[in-house]
Image: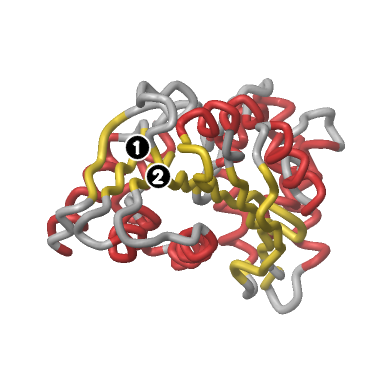
Amino acid sequence: MAGTAHFDRRAARYDRDGAHHRVASLVVASAELVDGCRVLDVATGTGFAALEAAGRIGPSGEVIGVDLSEAMLGEARRKAQEARAANVRFAQGDAERLSFSPASFDRILCSSALALMTDAPRALRHWRDLLKPGGLLAFDAPSTPFGFSERAAAAAARHGIRLGFSDLADTPDKCRALLEGAALDVVSVRKAIAASGPLALDRAVAMFDERIDHPAWRALGEAPPALRAAIRADYIRDLAAAAVDGRVANEIALCFAVGRRPAP
């Protein structure tokens, strides 16, 4: 998984975006949690999914949330302490290189993070190995429409820069292929709107600048400055052309997928 600077910087205000909580709730709801489950939440961030899962599995269950960003983990630990959630703990670690024993979890969750992986298919295979036979893996992935990020990806593509999140798993069929490629049986795949509502034009422009060091935008962040500037200019022109009364539509859709590790 890519570096942490972006998330370290955003940690203190990350929870202000209600979309993150809504997405985590949908991922958790799809995972068929039951009392006593042992759950791994990869790229847990500030612990949205981990804490919700902890409330569903009872005191006999356990949730482990793993993230690279210590700043994000600090927020997660604070919230767990405030909630007196004794069945959840958080640890720093790379979601693509975890050291847990094989077949040691009943459920694995990945909320708002699959697109951050440097190699998503390999990450899914890695997580599959950590599931017990019959265990479930639940994740979400960007679909279409995908708000201002989709506009940024389109502008980048016109200049030969591909932002991987834009077509990683943007259709149910691609999600099914990812699950099958990780040797998981497809349980369910569905598309849902996670957020809807216009953005002020100046806010949409600012979000482009704030995302330059986002791991999912790494190709844009690594582009030569002149090329980044040209892409930014195209992005702003697209926004201006689409704006109505100084606001731009920002509907965000996601695919939600669940796979099961087959029993031997």
Find residue 245 and report its horizontal and vertical position in percent. 71, 78
Q: Is residue 79 above or below residue 174?
A: below
Res. 23 visible in picture: yes
Q: Is residue 5 above or below residue 207?
A: above
> Is there a contact, CB below 8 Å, between mark 2 and mark 1?
yes
Find residue 226 and report its horizontal and vertical position in percent. 71, 26
Q: CA distance from mark 2 to mark 1?
A: 6 Å
Asked if residue 86 lies left or right of residue 42, the reply is left
Q: Secondary structure at mark 1?
A: strand
Residue at which label 2 appears: 41
What residue do we see at 71% from left, 62% from top? 190
What residue do we see at 56% from left, 52% from top? 207
Amino acid at dot 1: Val
Asked if residue 245 lies left or right of residue 82, the reply is right
Amino acid at dot 2: Asp
What residue do we see at 62% from left, 75% from top? 197
State the residue in front, 4 or 188.
Answer: 188
Residue lying at the far right in this picture: please name it: 158
Tag of residue 66: 1
State the residue in front, 149 or 168.
Answer: 168
Residue lying at the far bottom in this picture: please name it: 245
